[in-house]
Amino acid sequence: MVELPTLNEITEIAADNNPTRVAFGKGKDGQDVEWAEFNTKSCQSANSFRRFVTQGDRVAFLCDCSIEHMILWNGALKAGCIVSNLHTRASHETVAYCIDSIRPRVLVIDEEFSSVVEDHLYEEITNEIDTVVTTTEPKADYEVSIESFISGHESVEPDIRVREDDIAAILWTSGSTGRPKGWCHTHRGLGHKAMHLEKTLNITRTARQPHVFTPSFAAWYSLILPALYANASTYFLSDWDPKAFAELIERRRLTTAVLIPTMWKEVLGLDRLAEYEFESLTRIITSGERLDTATLSGLREHICDTVYNSYAATEVLGTVIADEELEDERVESVGKPISGTQVRVVEKGGPPDAVKQPGEVGEIIIKGPDRAVWAWNDTEKTESAFEDDWWYSEDLGYKDTEGYLYVEGRTDFMIKTKGIKVFPLPIEKILEDHSDIEHAAVIGVADGEYGEKVTAVVSRSNPEITGEELDEWCIGSDTIGRFERPREYRFVDRSLPRTATGKLDRTTIKHELEDISDARYRSV
């Protein structure tokens, strides 16, 4: 049987096949590292790691994306370790929980998080860490620079034996509704993920892509893995800035780019957008949020005429829709399953064969070869999230008669008002289509009359817009019923809260709104 190469072997293959091609670059004008040099430094770091770890030990990373992070991340894999990128936007308590949970032998940080470790973590965590490596200059006496860490070590591959079904990485959920879960992915699963994403993202050895996601996100892996397999070039932008992103595409002549819709909207909103040259782009991709018609049209007109949309999670990849399919009534679809993957819509929590009819909303479940195999130290969670290898997403959605999938929101955000189920996403779409509205969140608030009152929290661009006007706007809609429209509007003059993964944080909004003394939410 032909086996997939394990992740620790991939850059050795890249160094053999494309030694002088750029592997990673820093921003529009920063340093580049070629595949041969990258693999050499990765081997040096691997042999340095071997002083502190044995095969199967964990190495944790609390840092932003950089070439230095990639060298140490790849080196840890070459040393036979399980790698885990911690959430850089999470609370100190949550980071400490994750560290204590996986008990890493080595912690990798950068300058930005040095003070976090010093002030909040180093004395609090119960796990004994053998060494702390920084990708920048050391700030504390226990930190070791990457230069000192790898200096003098051999550039040969360590003598380890990693199997396809060994755990390679632990990816954390955001934990917006409780403790984060560390989902374990094998070398085999991540290999399948890489090969699927090569096709979806149009990644070949001549491809050049930007990378703006922190290592905390599953999206970080979604860009890194196919680039490793294809030997493509990746250019890091450590801090999100739409202007810098546009300049990066222009200067590096990038060929493909991935952002969530909110970020693409910021690019489209640049004052001098027409002055940037985006002709090098052959495909752009969006994922993670609802893609509306206006944004799609703007992307096609100003950025790239080939746009793909997709649906995926930390646990497993799901669907993709190609540009030629994104037309008319399918604009809001996330497409059909990627090759080798099955997607069904079933009764919430029901068995995999309780399939809903086209147009009926239910829970989305997915079965694919790249799925996670275990929630770290939480077999009960693993068994509740998977049934017969089907992953239960807790996302609501439906399929049309042609099998295209539409996502309606989360099962835990469904509102039951006067005994009728109401889903937030279609209402939010209607509100955000209004020219005076920036963003909207629709939640259910406990109420004596309704059970749950449909309530809209709105970030508005026009301070004069009123709840009465928005009520008329919703009544005039053809896509939501009168019973679904919000019965109360609350207005904010700031951005709505988002989770660590950049998604609308309805849980936080709901908790804040339930405190009637919270002056940030004004009823009009």
Image (spheres, helix red, strand yellow):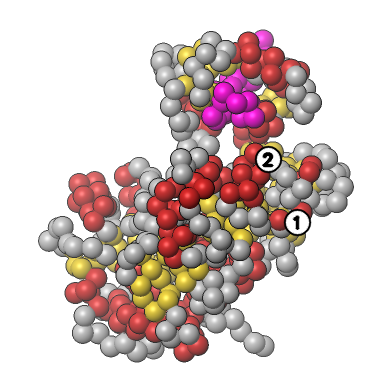
Question: Label 1 vs label 2: CA separation?
Answer: 14 Å
Which residue is nearer to you in this view: 221 or 345? 221
Residue 80 visible, this angle: no
Q: Quadrant of the N terminus?
A: bottom right
Q: Residue furthest left?
A: 141
Residue at 57%, 45% in the rendered image: 261
Which residue occupies 67% across, 15% down? 471
Would you say 440 lies left or right of 425 here?
left
372 vs 64, left or right, is: right
Give the main secondary structure of the magenta stretch: strand
Disc 1 crowd rating (10 Å Cα; few below 14, some 14-19, many 20+) is few
Q: Is residue 12 magenta?
A: no
Q: Tell me the magenta residue range.
A: 431-457
Q: Residues within 10 Å of mark 2 (few under 14, many from 20)?
A: some
| Residue that carries the numbered disc 2 in the rendered image | 293
Residue at 43%, 75% in the rendered image: 23
Residue 85 versus residue 303: which sits nearer the camera?
Answer: 303
User: Residue 324 got which mark?
Assistant: 1
**Residue 252 to residue 89: above or below:** below
Q: Residue flagged by tag 2: what amino acid is it? A: Thr
In the image, 409 versus 236, the foreground residue is 236
**Residue 102 % position (x, y):** 39, 60
